[in-house]
Image: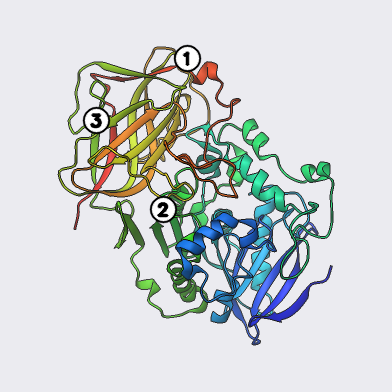
Amino acid sequence: MDYTTEIRDGMAIDWDVPIEMDDSNVLRADVFRPIAPGKYPVLMTHGPYGKGLSFQEGYKTPWDLMAARYPDALEGSTNQYQSWEVCDPEKWVPDGYVVVRVDSRGAGRSPGFIDHFSARENQDYYQCIEWAGVQPWSNGKVGLNGISYYGAGQWIVAGMRPPHLAAICPWEGFSDAYRESAFHGGIRCSFSKNWQELQVRSVQHGRAGGSVSKITGKPVCGDEVFSEETLKANRADVAGRSAAHPYDDALYAQGRAKLNQVTVPVLSAGNWGGQGLHLRGNVEGFLGAASEQKWLELHGNEHWTLFYAKYGVDLQKQFFGHFLKGEDNGWDQRPPILLNVRHVDKFVQRAESEWPLARTQWTKMHLDLEGKALSSTPSNKASTAAFDATRNGGLRFMSAPFKEETEITGPMACKLFLSSSTTDADLFLVLHLFDPEGKEKVFQGALDPMTSVGKGWLRASRRELDPARSLPYRPLHAHQRDLPLVPGQPVELDVEIWPTSIVVPAGWRIGLTVQGKDYEQEGPVSQLSNVKNPMKGCGPFLHDDPEDRPPAIFGGQTTLHAGEGMQPHLLLPIVPLR
């Protein structure tokens, strides 16, 4: 199959350019170039969503939502080249960039075996970067951009140090697949299984009856047609693999970014509402990257919209303009942290110098088990509080009304002392915000419009910490073995709660729920066309695999303990107002 070139909408477009890998498999890429001859910086994406599938067709409800809420995302483009979670070439090529979209192995028009973030796929990405760096239209500098899958892959390949890689912008992309995708606190998450079924299988290379590109008229899934048996044999079994690998082993090591090897400039963009996927990875990726030139941006709202909106495009263009084109545009004078601090009705942008913020007042809110309260003072009084792990609700601890406006921004942790009527227990922690009337204020999360302020998870048998990497405000669990409980005997647990930002108004309260299953909000639910589960507060990031959570073990009674030597508390990052 030869590739074709045509001039459209002010761009020279090469369709289905072959990129041969070192094992002779050929990946296919679309290359969008300025018409004028020359050498230009390259922006590349490499992933499994089908480069020929339009955003509007493949992801209709996210597209409609973005068009309604962020009309500037559609301005300045015909939008016919827009695809899910990648750059719109019509916004970049006129500024002197070459945009390269690669269908990863086994996806779209690239043949082969799909094996997400495997050593083979990572090596493919490396070789695509090096291919782009020496093309006649390239200035030798390749930048990586894109959301989610296209962001997570950036962390990995940057740690492999391809010589032509010059800068990366992982926009909402995890950096530790075990802790941030497959398992939360050692509890298996069903998201990846459903994601593969809906978003990857539908564009797998060789699938019959798939979409046809509105521009080229070619099948998004390639010209070959395979049987269902062949298609199944050509992809890794995501669900089966996580079931077979419950610990943080070599399988996850190959898909974990070697952050201490990432030396190129980094713009890591995370979402406060990304609880269950990406947020933790953007923060930990920024902190762990060895690059001397790195920036962390944190925002809110939907997972995809700000990337395409003027806010995101302007940010990306200043970053890549400086590092890929050598523009003296002031990017290097930016402070390393750009926060969109969340209020109940808005976001306020603020620059900072470090993460966590140096002026943070680490504040313990003690759990009063008898009064179901969050208290500023501890008690040595022996007490217990129990809940049925199968019921929604668990135990909720409420603070007193805040006397003055108070900002909570940063990572969090919760120390608990727990026993179970069985040999194990799963903990699901939710941090809430309540108005003076007692109504919870929820926010538009990365996916779910009913997202609470913060979430954390931990399986009690996975309580063992990695002492070399744990921090008081960010406990890190080893996940190398199980330590079963003795029924009725309490153990000490440190639960990581993913970072957050909220300015609590005077008179409002915060609450902490501790329960034994995924939290669900009450009221009407919404649905996105690209996810299986309706939105009830956790989005698609559920922990509902009965094989991972057999009721005989995880359906018992869980008891929290307090008293001498056992002082459960929530550690909050209180930021003094300037």
Q: Choose top left, top right, bottom left or bottom right for residue 38.
A: bottom right
- The first of marks 2 and 1 along the sequence is 2
Disc 2 from disc 3: Cα separation: 29 Å
Give the residue displayed 19% in from the left and 35% down from the top: 400
Q: Position of residue 309 (x, y in %)?
A: 47, 67
Viewport quadrant of the N terminus: bottom right
x and y, in percent, of residue 380 in the image: 20, 20
Q: Secondary structure at mark 1?
A: loop
How packed mark 2 is, by other alpha carbons closer than 10 Å (few <14, some 14-19, many 20 or more), is some
Percent position (x, y) of residue 412?
A: 33, 41
Kindly report the distance in space between the C-alpha atoms of the residues bearing marks 2 and 1: 38 Å
Name of the residue lying farthest toward the front:
524
Reading the image, the residue beneath label 3 is: 366
Q: Earlier in the sequence, mark 1 or mark 3?
A: 3
Could you tell me the amino acid type at mark 3?
His
Give the label on residue 554, or none.
none
Q: Label 2 is placed on what type of residue?
A: Leu
**Horizontal relation, residue 290 to residue 383: left or right:** right
Q: Mark 1 = which residue?
A: 422
Q: Tell me the kind of residue under disc 1.
A: Thr
User: Tag 2's secondary structure?
Assistant: helix
In this rendering, is residue 4 above or below 518? below
Secondary element type, mark 3: strand
Residue 496: quadrant of the picture:
top left
Q: Which residue is mark 2?
A: 287
Q: Is residue 147 visible?
A: no
